[in-house]
Image (cartoon, rainbow, N blue to C red):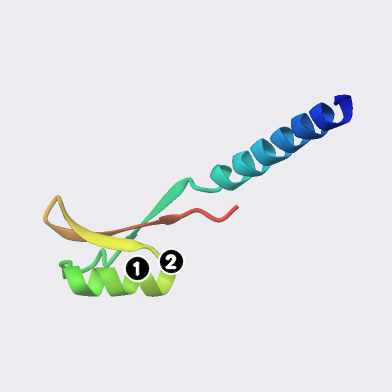
Amino acid sequence: MAKSTIFAIFMIVLVLGMVTKETKGQEMCRDLLMRAKNCDDSTCATLCKQKWKGNGSCFPNVYRKSCLCTFPCKT
């Protein structure tokens, strides 16, 4: 009985440690692409996917639309 309880506690700690390690690297990073010209949604998405394997979308920036790329940070 005692051995099974110790084993169960050990397994719970092990699983919780693995879950914590997996969620740590999920912080999102951002990069501005296409700063010199107006943003085109399809081009922005393609460039972002090629460069960072992320999602790109256009947003209004002072005088023109810029491409904002969001992607998972590497640890």
Q: Residue 3: where, in percent of width, then height?
A: 88, 30
28 left or right of 20 in image: left
62 left or right of 24 in image: left
Please state which of residues 3 and 14 is positioned toward the viewer in this rendering. 3
Q: Secondary structure at mark 2?
A: helix
Q: Residue drawn 38% across and 63% down?
A: 54
Q: Is residue 30 above or below residue 42?
A: above
Cα–Cα span, label 1 and label 2: 6 Å
Q: Is residue 7 above or below residue 51?
A: above
Q: Is residue 61 above or below residue 39?
A: above
Q: Residue furthest right?
A: 3
Please state which of residues 47 and 26 is positioned toward the viewer in this rendering. 26
- Which residue corresponds to mark 2? 52
Please state which of residues 18 and 74 is positioned toward the viewer in this rendering. 18
Label 2 amino acid? Trp
In which quadrant of the rendered view does residue 57 lie?
A: bottom left
Q: Residue 50: where, in percent of width, then height?
A: 39, 75
In which quadrant of the rendered view does residue 74 lie?
A: bottom right
Label 1 amino acid? Cys
Q: Is residue 62 above or below residue 37?
A: above
Q: Residue 1: where, in percent of width, then height?
A: 85, 26
Q: Residue drawn 80% across and 27% down?
A: 5
Q: Residue 55: where, in percent of width, then height?
A: 32, 62
Name the disc covering residue 48, or none.
1
How many neighbours does mark 1 have within 10 angstroms: few (below 14), some (14-19), or many (20 or more)? many
